[in-house]
Amino acid sequence: AGHARAESAISLREQGKHKEALAAFRKLSKDATYGKAALYELALLHHAMGMHSEGDEVAGSIGFKFRLNDAIFEGGQGIRERSTGSKSAKVFDNLVPEPLLQALRTAFSPDSNFWTAHQYPTDSFFSYNISIDEPGVTTKGGKKGKKDAPNPAGSGKPIPASTFALLQQLAVHILPAARSVF
């Protein structure tokens, strides 16, 4: 039932029926399996509609502390240089181990089945919502997952277990470095 409601909410959003999609994602946010992903989608939809305070509140409820500038969500209307804030980036050498980097290069290479499985090229946007605490996937020395992971906020298709595990392994290496500077 939750999967069908997720598909319906995504379909409403993709059809441009934003008010109906807001209501559908709010209802779905109570679902044990799809709740966090629904809240994520709800926050993004609020921002896309220019309702940034509402989007920030929803995103904050699931742990987000930072987000992109309003102009990004509004299609770049009126973008201008900011005169305040940091204008630097952090760079980490050798953050991702070579075997993982090679596996990611293979998984997302132009000739990998990832692109055809997701029907690229596509006019639709999708993203993966992946918890780094998801059981059954590789993290720090854990076991690899044996089944595909749910992807309620994405393309409607499950994330292949191998891709899911690679993305989680990448997060395990990136998050400590990011936390050390932010």
Image (spheres, rainbow, N blue to C red):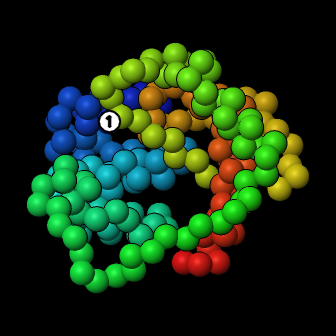
The image shows residue 148, relative to residue 38, as above or below, that is above
Tag 1: amino acid: Ala
Indicate the position of residue 109 as horizontal and vertical percent values: 61, 27
Between 135 and 116, the residue placed more toward the observer is 116
Residue 113 seen in render = yes
Give coordinates of residue 79: x percent, y percent.
17, 62
Q: Is residue 158 left or right of residue 170?
A: left
The residue sitting at 33% across, 56% down in the picture is 43
- 159 vs 95, nearest the viewer: 95
Residue displayed at 46% across by 27% down: 156
Name the one closer to the observer, 53 or 170. Answer: 170
Say which element carries label 1. Answer: helix
Q: Residue furthest left?
A: 78
Residue to which mark 1 is pinned: 9
Q: Position of residue 20 (x, y in %)?
A: 19, 40
Residue 10 screen position, x and y as percent: 33, 34
Q: Nearer the viewer, residue 80 or 30?
A: 80
Q: Is residue 135 visible?
A: no
